[in-house]
Amino acid sequence: MTRNTLAILERTGLFEGIQPDEAKKMLKCLGAINRRYSKDDYVFRRGDRTDCLGVVTEGCVRIVKEDYWGNRTVLSEVRTGGMVGCEYACSSESLLDVSVVAVEHSEVLFLDVNRIANVCTSSCEFHNRLVRNMIRILAHESVDLNQRLDQMSKRTTREKVCAFLSDQARISGEREFLVPLNRQQMADHLGVDRSAMSAELGRMKRDGLIEFSKNRFVLRRSQPSVPFCHELLEEADHVGMPVLGHLPAGRRTHHILQQQ
């Protein structure tokens, strides 16, 4: 195991609080296997079973949903330090309903979940910490999935966008924030057509609900005569957002938007 790989693992949530020398010993115990993939190679295929989770130690992989005819919907991208297959490995009887494909030359370190879950006889503290970290990661992914289900359950494109932007504002704690997705990724995330979503963003801007430049967004309070998203209004109140038109002169919001 190279020093670079150990350094990457140290920065992942799975190995949080575990020192490099401890991680090196643990990887032998866990039967770690490092594999390389070229662009468009499959890391996992839909219908596979796996007992191993993967940690991306180099490159980037994409989690995709494929239908019978081979059409793909991109669910997310996982870059260096991220994990794939954890939930399926923890439920080894479940078939994968997604595929994981390398976006570029990538390396993935596979760890046997059964060995992670069954603490060794010496019951070393760093192994116990690894188990706690894995439980925390699974819980976090469950919360993220519930948020996405809530967003996608909305009936219209506007309602979906409002729910997504409200969650982003809640995460940042401010009404001004960066969305970590480009327009195509955002449309895929919400399960809507990109052109329809872009048109809706333009209408929301004209209606006084939002301001945006590229992937930087600012939530606004709507005017009484304009239909608005309750989620956006509630989130504006929650983080103490004043009406954009009544911001003090020179407020950072205007300065940032003008820099784009």
Image (spheres, rainbow, N blue to C red):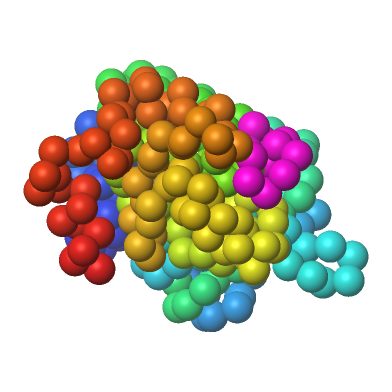
Position above or below: 188 against 156 = below
Q: Is the N terminus in the top left, top right, bottom left or bottom right quadrant?
A: bottom left
Q: Position of residue 46 (x, y in %)?
A: 76, 57
**Residue for point 32% across, 34% down:** 243
Does 151 appear in magenta? yes
Q: Position of residue 230 (x, y in %)?
A: 55, 27
Q: Position of residue 87 (x, y in %)?
A: 61, 37
Q: Is residue 81 left or right of residue 48?
A: left
Q: Is residue 81 left or right of residue 134?
A: left
Examine the rendering and report whether any part of residue 55 can be seen: no
Does 209 appear in magenta? no
Closer to us: 189 or 117: 189
**Residue for point 51% across, 64% down:** 183
Residue 137: image quadrant is top left
> For the magenta stretch, what is the residue range?
149-159
Q: Position of residue 254 (x, y in %)?
A: 20, 53
Residue 19: image quadrant is top left
**Residue for point 69% across, 56% down:** 192
Q: Is residue 7 left or right of residue 118?
A: left
Position above or below: 246 against 194 = above
